[in-house]
Amino acid sequence: MNKGELIDKIAKDAKLTKGQANDALDSFIAGVASTLAKGGKVTLVGFGTFSVTKREARKGRNPQTGKEINIKAKKVAKFKAGTELSKKVNK
């Protein structure tokens, strides 16, 4: 499912226009992104938790040349599925 298909589903299920559904989805995405950027986490009971984790600096290898390279430390977004979502996926 892509963003357009998700907007169509939200609009149909919530009886909204596609424009309203798009605005709602954009607001959700912006809210999650800004919370994660501040180092917080977003928990949706039954669905899952969005959080930020730090990936340490490490050595890597350039696949084209085989030369060893340094990979910088960085923050990455993480999602952990909740129990209810996991149960629905594993039916």
Image (cartoon, rainbow, N blue to C red):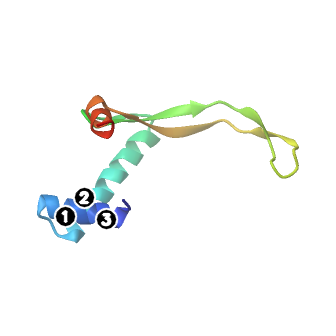
Camera-nearest label, 3 or 2: 3
**Res. 5 mark:** 3
At a point 27% along the width and 38% down the height, the residue shown is 88
Type of the residue with mark 2: Ala
Q: CA distance from mark 1 to mark 3?
A: 10 Å
User: Regarding mark 1 in the picture, which secondary structure is present there?
Assistant: helix
Residue 27: quarter of image: bottom left
At a point 17% along the width and 70% down the height, the residue shown is 17
Q: CA distance from mark 1 to mark 2?
A: 10 Å
Residue contact between numbered discs 3 and 2, judged by CB atoms under 8 Å: no
**Badge 1 is on which residue?**
11
Q: In the shown orientation, is residue 55 left or right of residue 70?
A: left
At a point 11% along the width and 63% down the height, the residue shown is 15
At a point 56% along the width and 38% down the height, the residue shown is 75
| First-in-chain label (1 vs 3) | 3
Q: CA distance from mark 3 to mark 2?
A: 14 Å
Residue 57 x/y as whole percent: 70, 32
Residue 59: quarter of image: top right
| First-in-chain label (3 vs 2) | 3
Rendered view: 23 above or below 45: below
Within 10 angstroms of label 2, few (less than 14), some, or many (20 or more) residues?
some
Residue 51 x/y as whole percent: 43, 35
* Of residues 75 and 45, the one drawn nearer to the viewer in this rendering: 45
Q: Is residue 22 visible?
A: no
Rendered view: 71 above or below 31: above
**Badge 2 is on which residue?**
24
| First-in-chain label (1 vs 2) | 1
Type of the residue with mark 1: Ala
User: Regarding mark 2 in the picture, which secondary structure is present there?
Assistant: helix
Residue 23: quarter of image: bottom left
Residue 31 x/y as whole percent: 33, 48
